[in-house]
Image: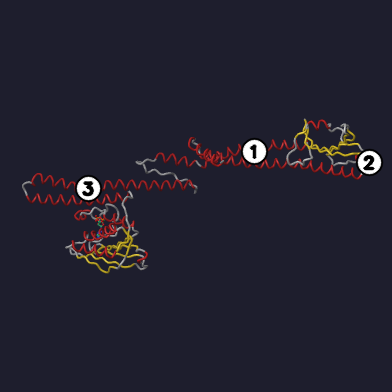
Amino acid sequence: MWYAIRARLARWIDRYFYIRISTKITLLYAAILFFVLILSTAILGVGAYIYFYRQAEVDLDRSIRHVMNNIESGHAAEAKFWFEGPVIPGVIVRITDDAGRVVLDTDAHFPSIETVENGRVSAPFWASPDMELSEFRNGAVYHAQRDIEYGGIPYHIHFFRTITTEKDFFNALQRLLFYTVAICFVLALIAGHFISTRILKPIRQITWTARSIEVERLGRRLDVPRARDELAELARTFNRMLDRLQEGFRQEQRFVSDASHELRTPLTVILGYSDMLSRWGREDRNILDEGITAIRSEAENMQQLIEKLLFLARADQKRQAVNKEDVNLAEMLADTMEKMQMVTTTHEVTLGANTPAIVSADPVLLRQLLRIFLENSLKYTPAGGHIHAFSARSQDGASVLVTLTDDGIGIAPEHQPHIFDRFYRVDSSRTKETGGSGLGLSIARWIAERHDIEITLTSEVDVGTSITLAIPLVKDSA
Ligand code: ADP
């Protein structure tokens, strides 16, 4: 119940009030300190209070027992007993008869019984039930009464113990504790405010810098505080996030400009041919044929390019579906190679050892992956060249290694790290003839990543290129 109210209050405050963290921390710590101070002073105060009463009670109790024992044993009948101090110092005995007359008194200056009776207040709950407490103008008295009969006449024996000094001391202590708590609380507020403001200063700086960062000006970075703490970590994380964002924006801008650039070339060609056709195509049959063929080929290039762009766009937006199922890789490799053999007249396409293997993959994407590499081999291997594929189990038996080799133009070492980047082409004039856009391998990389396939490339200029795909096997088939 209390917890629910507190949670609601906190939510309400958070919603409607802007309270600085430093203020919250200060208030929280001050409140905790205040609570601890109050608790300890309360314990101290109550302890002192109980102790005073206890002392008075013990004194009274002992005195009562001493007097009553002596009365019982008959010693009290001698006047000597009363004059030699029958009670503990500080305790006063006064005997009255039924009419209230004082018969014996160890301190005649002590306030009268009426005064004491009039000032009676209720004794604290822990006090012994037969003790009374009275307070009057300049003092406080703890007292008890015993009734006896002597010679057939009833008497009342009153025992008093003044606790004025103790009470004064207690009051002084109370005041002192109150001021100490108040001063400590104020000091804690001031110190807490200064300390937390100082500690949280970098956060305000971070906020200011973050405000000044915009999409067009992503270059700004936060100053990382020298101390190695959470704030430095926050600033560093924030900077790293900005690095990634900036890189993301840069890539996106480059992608858009590269894509537009790629699309512009076939469009220019198409426009050129259609101009030519409109001028001479009607009369000249050869020009008509050439124009139509060229326009068709460029349109096909464009279509392929757009397909690839759409694929990558879907991949970037995580919308490209990957529907994995158990795929018979050996069958797929054999089938792909067979189709290649059928359509390729210029190159020799062969399939070597083909180990049986079941892999978990999206069949459409896996076939696309194989074809990207095989078509590259075809594109970058001069006519008469040889394209060969084979598969084998890896040494640990956990995956199947599919190797696709060609004896084509190869890739120079300085280009090898980049060929999987988008729009990267080793020699754009050569690839232009082959209709390459530099997107094939980036699609291959994406497909491989989604299937945990590791790609290894070895290539040498004018010797050839070899690609090995390590495809994880389905566990039961391994
Ligand atoms: P493209 O559509 O231009 O072929 P890719 O992304 O498939 O784009 O390939 C990137 C570049 O890598 C190609 O432009 C080509 O220069 C080089 N490359 C890829 N495969 C081979 C290969 N088998 N032999 C030689 N170069 C290759």
Q: Amino acid at mark 2?
A: Glu
Say which quadrant the C terminus sits in: bottom left
Say which quadrant the N terminus sits in: top right
Q: Is mark 2 within 8 Å of ligand 1?
A: no
Q: Check disc 1: other Cα within 10 Å, few if <14, some if 14-19, many if 20+.
A: some
Q: Amino acid at mark 1?
A: Val
**164 relative to 443, above or below:** above
Q: Which residue is mark 3?
A: 263
In this view of the protein, which residue sits in the foreground, 278 or 148? 148
> What residue lies at 89% left-to-right and 35% top-to-bottom?
104
CA gap, disc 3 and disc 1: 79 Å
Q: Earlier in the sequence, mark 3 or mark 1?
A: 1
CA gap, disc 3 and disc 2: 132 Å
**151 relative to 455, above or below:** above
> What residue lies at 23% left-to-right and 51% top-to-bottom?
305
Q: Where is residue 58 drawn, in percent x and y?
A: 80, 43
Between disc 1 and disc 2, the foreground one is: 2
Q: Amino acid at mark 3?
A: Leu
Q: Where is residue 412 drawn, in percent x and y?
A: 27, 59
On the picture, is 477 further left or further right than 203? Answer: left
Callout 3 secondary element: helix
Q: Check disc 2: other Cα within 10 Å, few if <14, some if 14-19, many if 20+.
A: few
Callout 1 secondary element: helix
Identify the disc placed on residue 78. Answer: 2
Q: Is mark 3 within 8 Å of ligand 1?
A: no
Q: Which residue is mark 1?
A: 181
On the picture, is 124 further left or further right than 377? Answer: right
